[in-house]
Image (cartoon, coloured by chain):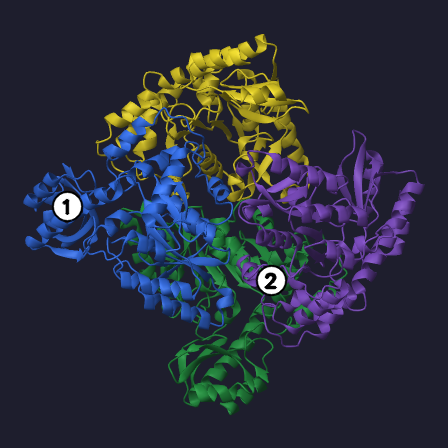
Chain colours: A yellow, B purple, C green, D blue
Amino acid sequence: MISFLNDYSEGAHPRVLQRLIDTNMQQETGYGTDTFTTAATAKIKEALDCPQAKICFLTGGTQTNQIVIGSLLKSYQGVIAADSGHISLHESGAIELTGHKVLTVPGQDGKIAAPTLANYLKDFYDDDSRQQMVFPGMVYISYPSEYGTLYSKQELTALAAVCREYHLPLYIDGARLGYGLVSPEADLTIQELAQLADVLYIGGTKIGALCGEAVVFTKNNQPDYFYSFVKQHGALLAKGRLNSLQFLELFTDNLYFEISRHAVQLALQLKQGFLDKGYRLYIDSPTNQQFFIMDNQKVQDLSQQVLFTRWGKYDETQTILRFVTSWATHAEAVEQLLTLI
Amino acid sequence: MISFLNDYSEGAHPRVLQRLIDTNMQQETGYGTDTFTTAATAKIKEALDCPQAKICFLTGGTQTNQIVIGSLLKSYQGVIAADSGHISLHESGAIELTGHKVLTVPGQDGKIAAPTLANYLKDFYDDDSRQQMVFPGMVYISYPSEYGTLYSKQELTALAAVCREYHLPLYIDGARLGYGLVSPEADLTIQELAQLADVLYIGGTKIGALCGEAVVFTKNNQPDYFYSFVKQHGALLAKGRLNSLQFLELFTDNLYFEISRHAVQLALQLKQGFLDKGYRLYIDSPTNQQFFIMDNQKVQDLSQQVLFTRWGKYDETQTILRFVTSWATHAEAVEQLLTLI
Amino acid sequence: MISFLNDYSEGAHPRVLQRLIDTNMQQETGYGTDTFTTAATAKIKEALDCPQAKICFLTGGTQTNQIVIGSLLKSYQGVIAADSGHISLHESGAIELTGHKVLTVPGQDGKIAAPTLANYLKDFYDDDSRQQMVFPGMVYISYPSEYGTLYSKQELTALAAVCREYHLPLYIDGARLGYGLVSPEADLTIQELAQLADVLYIGGTKIGALCGEAVVFTKNNQPDYFYSFVKQHGALLAKGRLNSLQFLELFTDNLYFEISRHAVQLALQLKQGFLDKGYRLYIDSPTNQQFFIMDNQKVQDLSQQVLFTRWGKYDETQTILRFVTSWATHAEAVEQLLTLI
Amino acid sequence: MISFLNDYSEGAHPRVLQRLIDTNMQQETGYGTDTFTTAATAKIKEALDCPQAKICFLTGGTQTNQIVIGSLLKSYQGVIAADSGHISLHESGAIELTGHKVLTVPGQDGKIAAPTLANYLKDFYDDDSRQQMVFPGMVYISYPSEYGTLYSKQELTALAAVCREYHLPLYIDGARLGYGLVSPEADLTIQELAQLADVLYIGGTKIGALCGEAVVFTKNNQPDYFYSFVKQHGALLAKGRLNSLQFLELFTDNLYFEISRHAVQLALQLKQGFLDKGYRLYIDSPTNQQFFIMDNQKVQDLSQQVLFTRWGKYDETQTILRFVTSWATHAEAVEQLLTLI
């Protein structure tokens, strides 16, 4: 069986693993005071050209979203997200657990269009009964989106401008950040992204790490006593080195982007191969997740030899499929898959 | 100025006030252990033909929704409501504050259609990723709805059947319950309603009381230690008599329904008067809230002599207006209004 | 049976009731925007000599503590209270429900001594592991305390000084505020109290109102969007007039203090009577709650004719009793009681 | 510098690291559905002789305590712990964040004595005002305690009996479980411990893993939808393999106990060495944490060559020190230390 199930099926990228091995006996203090945290923070600040950033290493994506959003919102505020946003749908109510509403706006291919946000906010502030409504307190987007799509520089700049106008922090969920930034269709650098965002997280789990996400408050805007907040949420590891060390390696010699580039190249080959064979895209993704429509019978056959995700029913006779690549995907696997379809 | 602003502009219905006067010096024990609570509970159980019901008197509607929903849901569950539901929009995130998501389904004239609910639930249980989603744990509806509309017996029976099928408690927000039950278009009795619901609350604040809502767990399904839960939410009054006594009077000699009937009769006269003068309904409500469309210039003129609510913009030149009647509305006020429009 | 059970056994003081009657048909807007709220706010600001105060009328004491404390603390902070404090013991975990720890310090007769607080804070800030502890965020005291005792001006000034030194708001629970201020042993005026506190609440329920507590942020320090916070906690009444109107009357012609003086005078007569008959005080209270030690057999006899509270076991043969007076207590009842003991 | 700072200064035990290396390329499904989870679960069930146990692998101790306690308590309940308990003092209010009070009882050397618990519970159920108090809902202890001390079989059996009598689940925090079980003073086996507990967690982070704690519901008492609860708390790792795999290795060929034995042997040598040199114990610990009293000047000198923890001030001239051993501690380091003191 060859697998395109997801980008977290294996352990760590060999270089990340090697770094764990090399440093295993090095003694470090706990709870995020280790020297790897200092070094990784410096690397990331440099990569993002954000000298004033504050960085915190957490363990998983839902945890990160919960902590960032929970720490930034006031009690009476909610977070705006696309209706397809991960926090809206697939985090088991982790945001609501912190007492906050996810305020959904209609997404377009997984993205929030600036005019959609502007209208939402205008309507809210025009509404005489807004005192009894949840106040918008920040905006959440994902880059790439849950459908693998990307904001253009123009789109994100426009969205950020609306956020600034209403004094709403813009938070970017970058669980798969690298796969977006290296896409041939991306016209945004990581520095520009950091500039447009108020907070973002750089995903490690899905880009070569065993675990770990790096939260970056880009504008010297990390809430006071953030580490106490993290501890209170059960997210401060005694061996904080585990998360920071992996990021130290990922941001050494561009590994993070190399991994991303490898996966996206294979994903785009895979996409071209499907298109060449006449398959239709369910959504046109330029990153490491690809979505196709396939006849149910063909799906059945293919599933004997390939692992992938049935994303949903397209119609009575066709299914939407998702194929995902990662650092661990071999070019041969893509070729094999293309011969099978 | 004559007022059709809402149904809570005055104090208490004179009979309710008189009861407060008559019993003022009677000594009672606190925190809901008073004899009025016992007596009012008996009256309501009789009126609803629910001998096994458990009843608790609370102070306001948002508080009641928060406590009922918070006490019935498990942590990983949310409450299904129409997108126009009061808990979805106008309670400042009181449900989310308890850690639970409001799962919205599209409403029709403020109501949830049984097939809409059934499809939502079927889709949820068909979804392979539901382990990472918020599980539906109960269904919230309002009777009458936020638009003054009513479920027919058939509609509510169908909805309750879906709830039963999925083992979801059905909770009816009856902030304006009386105005629904006495409407000429209502084909449901309060006993039938109590039978179809698992929990409901009988609104007092908007139907003649100074404050107070009566929560009825109709199926011997009040959560254990419910009073501790109520206390923990700051909702257990030392002078619990205040809420229960008012309900005792409201459920003596049918006062609750008399008040409701008076208001609905005037509302329907008002509606007919508007229709006779050629105004269009925004929504066809058979209860004490009426919604019309009016030219902006006319709205401006009318607002010099009448208090009402601008519900929203209909289009560039017209506004949606809401007029509400109550026990305190005089027939003359309706006549005056009709001459003014 | 004559009753000394508590100070909330009857309805409202006759003058408060009369005001409800007189204003019943007056039309007012909802949710705290009524003219009574404006008028009562002005009266209280004048009485406290706090022109810059912000005042909000809530319904009960636990609700008030929950909302004030919840709105002032940051997530990682807790509230310091005496181990005997109402929020520590008798509010069913209402503070913890908001996510905050009650940090207890040993009380002395229900009060926190300034050196006790200073030591607690010094130890906390000297502790290297404080990053993993709950940060003290405010100080809660009650005046009178749960044992009816009072802080002297000197004691409260010293306590407030410690609070200022550590930038901790000082919050005074005044559920029975009037009974403290009018005590012959009190050397604090309400104006001085307001000056020393950062927030306090003036209790209505236990001093003549049907319900209602007035929260006073004395230093222009009411949190932003406080009304949304109140709504979110289910504490914003549609008929907000109910609470504010009662305070308007209580603060007209000194009624609040008249009621308090009446009760305290009777309580002190009762205390003197017990002492004259040789009973021992459990605690020496100068306010409307009195605590005595009585032989179990005598308690049994007395309970046939008088209602009071068994506060706890003193030893194997004696019980601690609590007797409470209020506006509704008659001088004759005190005399009767004294002849019975 | 030689270090006795804590038991989490290095990475993973070499065998655990090797297992991560060996399995790195193995493809596994996510979120706890991996084959390592299945295998590790089987190993632990066997080791504990608990065929009916349910096991869940989490990442850190505070997270584990928060999730276990939050999932077992009803809203109106709190958790009983010793005043020195980790959840009482050093988890930044993580339990209160879930809405629950930590109900403290006085500890003895970090332990709760059965009669202390029994008295607390008797007093609670004898108290007429308990309806307004937080109900005890479970009991939390740590084994070894925060001071390294151990419950004897008799002590733990008595404590568990009180828990059973009051239907309270007994939860054992085993952050350092192994160090307790292998101590020469321990008279409890892991099977007996599992029998006496209703839930326990086996700590990995402090006993050789990079991260990871194994929660064991020993009595088929894992709450329904526990994984949704875990996800909602941000604690479900995409690469769930990371935690489970490490436990698989730790429970292969007794590695968990070998690691523990190594550390405890060195700790006891260290203790004997200190005693031989005339130092006094602050507390008599039979496990891998040792507490001594030392003159301040000597502390100052020693700190130039050895890393340890200043636990607190003993008196004006002496300090309490903590020395901790682990799998990574060398016998030579203990010898060196003993020559230095």
- Residue under the image location 39 percent in, 66 percent down: C111
Instruction: Tell me which corner region of the image, top left, top right, bottom left or bottom right, holds residue B129.
Output: top right
Q: Is residue D220 above or below residue B80?
A: below
Q: Residues within 10 Å of mark 1 (few under 14, many from 20)?
A: many
**Percent position of residue C28, x then y:** 72, 54
Q: Is residue B146 above or below residue A253?
A: below
Q: Is residue A245 visible?
A: no
> In the displayed image of the protein, which residue is found farthest to the right?
B276
Q: Chain ID for label 1? A: D
Which image quadrant: the C terminus of chain A?
A: top right
**Percent position of residue C226, x then y:** 56, 48
Q: Which residue is mark 1?
A: D266
Q: Amino acid at mark 1?
A: Leu
Q: Is residue D328 above or below residue C207?
A: above
From the viewer's perspective, tell me whether residue C35 is left or right of residue D340: right
Tell me whether circle 2 and circle 1 mark residues in contact (CB < 8 Å). Answer: no
Q: Amino acid at mark 2?
A: Gly
Instruction: Tell me which corner region of the image, top left, top right, bottom left or bottom right, holds residue C331.
Output: bottom right
| Mark number, residue C212 | 2
